[in-house]
């Protein structure tokens, strides 16, 4: 068994594995970049030794973890802003655009230190928020222009059971903000975990992600409930970033799938259109004299109605031009002749036997062709 | 273990018919059949005699380190199959088991519980400069043409010993195996799925690394890392840096196999690094290997993997040239033709 013959045999079978099914998620060889990666690996210090046999093991795992965390951070939108944001916000979207919203808040800013903070987070204790785990209010209505995330208070109203209430403080300029989340929770959000509303009031043109309009009412069942005060843990920050990047991928995947479905339907419609375009109706007869002559010839032969119908269609499709290969499919002829698809191949064979056409079977995904003789 | 060729194998090797092989054996009085036995067994000595009759062949001398970081790809099986078959073809073969799990050792029916001399003991003796040190003390003879230095679990300490004693890696095996390259045509190292000083020393000593891979993504990752390791040894310890990638356990039912193989083919285009032969997946081979049977006693027609192993051996040891050796003409015919020529 050698490689060349195996690959040739595979090709001759006409299978195209890469086109079938979902796009392969398995890493391909080129992704590993065998020739160039070696240098990287060596420099990544799996072995740093000298010629005397001394070897210094470095922690490969550590390197990889560092590398991974770096890449994660670079992918997340939050990291793009250069402000030392104490608030991390992740938006989880599953199937639809804004099905699930998850907000992680890390509160590190105290009341005093608000002036220079990128995001101003303050206490919501002004209002009646006895059961709320975290309440975040605004202190920075003035200077929020460069803030990565603007989170303000909504807890003035009744948010007794709400875990977190996030409101709008960003009516001012938040053009540079990465994500702007505004309030929807002024109303009744008693059992909701988090409420996020429209930000469209402000200018979010350059924002990396804008989370708009989560149904104000129905957030209660959202998977992401930001309850605990332990949100302040740094680990949540990383998780949020990872989740966000993962979500972006899944959203892209979902939209690609929709596109593909839509594309397939459109292609099918196009095919139908092309069959009937330019007068290629089932009963259309091209050049009348010639067609009539041919059909009479065929009628005198032992062919049946199906064959005549198909011949008529093929003549029309070829516009009477002989010796030119024209692609066809069985469903297409089936549609034109009102015959079942399963009969078409025998119909075409009969036409070939009677010297009307010469057909050529397509290899693999190629379409078959016919040629008027 | 009885290692021999059949007349059909020899016929294929010489590119002649089986009948012609029998005729040749009969003409030169080489007895291949024992009384009461049906099979004709052509042992390496007999093959060498046949080769001499046909004008002789040139044998290459090589040492291979069979190594990859990914486990379970068939390193030991490849070592077993190549070593045992090469010895059938008359190559004086030495196999060195450096894997502490001792699978290669066990596959020849040698128990690793015995008090055997492994490379660890050899290293200690060599390091302390013991008088009369000879690596041949550790040899087990499987057949006259096939020897093995076995392994057992204690071999795990070899890496540590090398580290503690700050042994020069590039000079380790040339010292320990002094004279081996001259004595043996083929030296095969069965390495563990690991990177350490032992693997580095082996790559520094061996002429070429054989990297068996399966057609899956993790194997490709293993290949990448092993290739980097070999390259590192080449730069730091003056290794050869040569390697061959062998596709093992190839499964034609798997679409991914073809995709990866095509990608590898493109990647190694115009380079000799990818072995052109493929070893298909085989259950009988796995079973025979685990039970310590002779792989080559399996029915060739039923086990295509054997063909794969043999093709790889032919490619590695440049044995394809053997087929092109023209048969020596019989003296009677040569004389008669010579006479005619002379007459002209």
Image: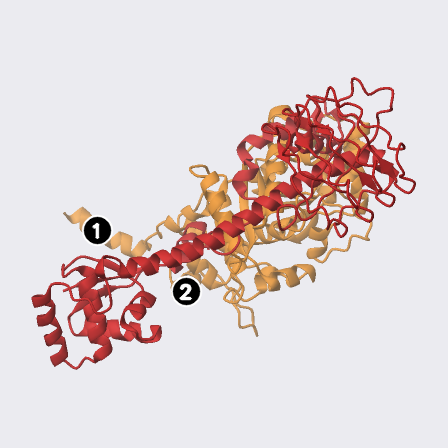
Chain colours: A red, B orange
Would residue B239 be visible to someone looking at this image? no
Mark closer to the chain start, 1 or 2: 2
Q: Nearer the viewer, mark 1 or mark 2?
A: 2
Q: Residue at x 57, y 35 (%)?
A: B207
Front residue (pair A145, B118): A145
Task: Give the structural element (helix, strand or loop) at label 2.
Answer: helix
Q: Quadrant of residue A127?
A: top right
Q: Is residue A63 above or below residue B49?
A: above
Q: Residue at x 17, y 65 (%)?
A: A315
Placement of the N terminus of chain B among the 4 image quadrants: bottom right
Q: Position of residue B46 (x, y in %)?
A: 51, 56
Return the chain for callout 2: B
Dot 2: few (<14), some (14–19), or many (≥20) neighbours within 10 Å?
some
Front residue (pair B236, B183): B236
Dot 1: few (<14), some (14–19), or many (≥20) neighbours within 10 Å?
few
Q: Is residue B175 above or below residue B296?
A: above
Q: Position of residue A3 (x, y in %)?
A: 45, 50
Are labels 1 and 2 assigned to the same chain? yes
The residue wearing badge 2 is B18
Q: Position of residue B28 (x, y in %)?
A: 43, 59
Front residue (pair B143, B332): B143
Q: Residue at x 47, y 63 (%)?
A: B7
Task: Give the structural element (helix, strand or loop) at label 1.
Answer: helix
Q: Which mark is residue A369?
A: none
The residue wearing badge 1 is B339
């Amino acid at each position: 068994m050698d490689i060349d013959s195996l690959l040739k045999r595979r090709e001759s079978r006409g299978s195209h594995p890469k086109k079938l099914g979902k796009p392969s998620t398995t890493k391909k060889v080129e992704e590993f970049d065998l020739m160039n990666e070696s240098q990287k690996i060596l420099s990544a210090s799996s072995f740093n030794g000298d010629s005397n046999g001394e070897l210094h093991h470095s922690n490969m795992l550590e390197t990889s973890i560092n590398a991974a965390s770096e890449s994660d951070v670079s992918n997340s939108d939050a990291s793009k802003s250069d402000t030392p944001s104490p608030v991390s916000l992740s938006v989880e979207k599953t199937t639809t655009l804004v099905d699930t919203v998850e907000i992680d808040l890390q509160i590190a800013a105290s009341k005093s230190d608000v002036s220079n903070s990128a995001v101003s987070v303050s206490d919501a204790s002004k209002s009646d928020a006895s059961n709320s785990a975290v309440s975040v209010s605004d202190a920075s209505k003035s200077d929020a222009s460069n803030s990565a995330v603007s989170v303000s208070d909504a807890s003035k109203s009744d948010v007794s059971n709400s875990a977190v209430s996030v409101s709008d403080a960003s009516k001012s300029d938040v053009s540079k903000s990465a994500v702007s989340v505004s309030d929807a929770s002024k109303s009744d959000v008693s059992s909701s975990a988090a409420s996020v509303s429209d930000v469209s009031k402000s200018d979010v043109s350059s924002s990396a992600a804008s989370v708009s309009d989560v149904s104000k009412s129905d957030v209660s069942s959202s998977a992401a409930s930001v309850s605990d005060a332990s949100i302040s843990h740094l680990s949540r920050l990383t998780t949020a970033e990872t989740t966000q990047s993962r979500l972006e991928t899944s959203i892209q995947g979902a939209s690609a799938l929709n596109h593909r479905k839509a594309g397939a339907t459109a292609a099918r419609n196009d095919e139908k259109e092309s069959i009937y375009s330019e007068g290629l109706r089932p009963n259309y007869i091209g050049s009348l004299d010639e067609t009539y002559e041919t059909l009479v010839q065929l009628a005198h032969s032992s062919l049946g109605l199906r064959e005549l119908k198909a011949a008529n269609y093929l003549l029309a499709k070829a516009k009477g031009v002989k010796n030119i290969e024209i692609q066809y499919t069985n469903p297409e002829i089936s549609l034109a002749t009102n015959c079942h698809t399963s009969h078409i191949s025998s119909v075409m064979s009969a036409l070939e036997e009677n010297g009307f056409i010469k057909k050529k079977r397509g290899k693999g995904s190629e379409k078959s062709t016919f040629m008027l003789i | 273990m009885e290692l021999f060729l059949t007349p059909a194998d020899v016929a294929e090797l010489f590119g002649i018919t089986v009948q012609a092989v029998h005729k040749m054996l009969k003409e030169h009085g080489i007895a291949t059949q024992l009384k009461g036995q049906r099979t004709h067994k052509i042992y390496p000595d007999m093959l060498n005699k046949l080769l001499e009759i046909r004008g002789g062949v040139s044998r290459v001398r090589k040492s291979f380190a069979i190594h990859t970081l990914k486990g379970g790809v068939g390193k030991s099986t490849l070592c077993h199959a190549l070593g045992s078959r090469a010895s059938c073809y008359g190559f004086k073969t030495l196999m060195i088991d450096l894997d502490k799990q001792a699978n290669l050792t066990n596959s020849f029916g040698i128990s690793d519980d015995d008090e055997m001399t492994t490379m660890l003991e050899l290293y200690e003796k060599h390091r302390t400069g013991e008088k009369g040190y000879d690596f041949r003390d550790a040899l087990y003879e499987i057949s006259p043409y096939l020897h093995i230095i076995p392994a057992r679990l204690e071999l795990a300490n070899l890496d540590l010993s090398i580290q503690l004693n700050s042994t020069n890696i590039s000079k380790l095996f040339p010292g320990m195996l002094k004279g081996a390259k001259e004595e043996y045509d083929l030296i095969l190292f069965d390495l563990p799925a690991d990177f350490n000083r032992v693997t580095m020393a082996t790559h520094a000593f061996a002429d070429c690394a054989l990297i068996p891979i399966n057609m899956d993504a993790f194997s490709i990752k293993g290949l990448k890392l092993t290739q980097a390791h070999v390259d590192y040894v080449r730069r730091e310890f003056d290794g050869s840096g040569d390697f061959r990638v062998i596709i093992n356990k190839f499964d034609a039912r798997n679409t991914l196999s073809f995709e990866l193989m095509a990608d590898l083919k493109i990647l190694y285009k115009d380079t000799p690094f990818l072995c052109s032969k493929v070893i298909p997946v085989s259950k009988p081979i796995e079973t025979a290997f685990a039970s310590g049977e002779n792989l080559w006693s399996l029915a060739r027609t039923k086990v295509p993997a054997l063909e794969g192993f043999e093709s790889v051996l032919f490619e590695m040891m440049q044995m394809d040239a053997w087929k092109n050796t023209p048969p020596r003409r019989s003296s009677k015919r040569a004389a008669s033709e010579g006479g005619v020529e002379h007459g002209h």
